[in-house]
Image (spheres, rainbow, N blue to C red):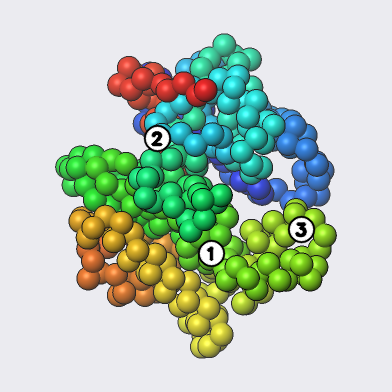
Amino acid sequence: MKKVLVLNFGSTSTKLALYAEDRQILHKEFHHSSDEMGTPFTLKEIAAARKALILRHLKEQGVDLSRLDAVVGRGGLIRPVAGGTYRINEKMVKDLTDCVYGYHACNLGGILAADIAGELGKPAFTVDPPVIDELTDVARLSGHRDFPRRPLFHALNARAVARRYAGERGLRYDGLGLIVAHMGGGVTVSAHRNGRIVDVNNGLEGEGPYSAERPGALPVLPIVRAVYEGKFGDSYESFRWFFTARCGLISYLGTNDGRVVSLRARQGDADAELAYRGMAYQIAKEIGAMSAALCGEVDAILLTGGFAHDAMFTGWIEEAVSFIAPVSVYPGENEMLALAQGALRVLRGEETALEYS
């Protein structure tokens, strides 16, 4: 029986799970405040704090690490690659540690999976990293040759949900046309054609719908003027913080908690309902755009992520897009199981691990 340790990091969260084959036998999620984590300033310091937390919890639960067959981590921001399960090698760890392709907490997934697995003499893997690049050539065009579009999105969950949908119906994922909308702190809507993600909005750098705390596509010239006028401070980091943490619902309503926004809307708060409907409206428009990317050959539209728990919210979207294709809802995320299954496919010899270079 193969055993796999799964690690999944966010900026304020650490998730870990232990799988025996496809069965989850341990799960824990930690939420971190800056005081709790000692406000480390470097990725190295953060990695050390998170590693200590993980190992302490596993020891408390009596987990024998020597019996693991592999460690798998989500992320992170590496060179754009095709989808699949990748063996975490020295080159990947270096790119993640040096933040060559960007800084994000998900970089910890590859770093710590390799670290823990290496100490045990076991392999480390990552599955469908957020930089999966299967875009068609025409989808890369942005409007200026110096700024090509690049995919930064919830690749792991999007593909996991698509595979789940196909499996539940006895269909092959690589024979379907699907649109998957992941709706969480960021929103990304991806077009899947015959097993490849041929188009998707960049959910981190200013494309697509607004979300709980990100702006989606903002008008460029007013933003540039505001930057020159010093509205966002005097550094790129201050602007990046505004752009990724102070936009979307939080800018309209002062909260990024979808549960609070939904409750306010249900209780008659007109501002909350308008902002919440606006987010649903923009997601529906992006789904429409992706249906054009698939030339209308859409078998299903799949709604997932944290906001998919809200039937009122998904109902607004379904009302707008059900003319395109049937809508199915998969609340939450399926990332932990998807990570485990990717590693297990390699361990069972069902799939060959890809090498990062």
Looking at the image, is 326 positioned above or below residue 58?
Answer: below
Does label 2 or label 1 sit earlier along the sequence? 2
Residue at x-position 81% and y-position 63%: 233
Please name the amino acid that badge 2 sits on. Gly
Measuring from the top left, give residue 266's x and y in whole percent: 48, 82
| Residue 61 sits above or below residue 177 on the image | above
Q: Reading the chain from its start, which is encountered first: label 2 or label 3?
A: 2
Measure how far apart labels 2 and 1 are at the Cα level.
24 Å
Residue 212 visible in the displayed image: no
Q: Are marks 2 and 3 in contact (CB under 8 Å)?
A: no
**Residue occupying the point 50% across, 82% down:** 273
**Crowd around label 2: few <14 · some 14–19 · many ≥20 (10 Å):** many
Please name the residue shown 45% across and 39% down the image: 132
Q: Who's the residue at 60% across and 64% down the image?
A: 213
Q: Position of residue 45 (x, y in %)?
A: 77, 34
Asked if 80 appears above or below 66 in the picture, the reply is: below
Residue carrying label 2: 83
In the picture, measured across the screen, residue 46 lies left or right of residue 193, that is: right
Question: Could you say whether the residue bearing mark 2 is in a helix, strand or loop?
Answer: loop
User: Tag 1: Cα neighbours inside 10 Å, few (<14), some, or many (≥20)?
Assistant: many
Q: As shown in the figure, which amino acid type bears the numbered disc 3?
A: Ser
Q: Which residue is mark 1?
A: 216
Tell me the residue that label 3 is attached to. Answer: 238
Q: Quadrant of residue 284?
A: bottom left
Front-most of residues 46 and 104: 104
**Spatial separation of the CA atoms under disc 3 and disc 1:** 18 Å
Residue that protrudes farthest toward the left in the picture: 170
Numbered disc total: 3
Label 3: element kind? helix
**Marker disc for residue 71:** none
Whether residue 327 sits left or right of residue 68 in the image: it is: left
Mark 3 vs 1, N-terminal side? 1
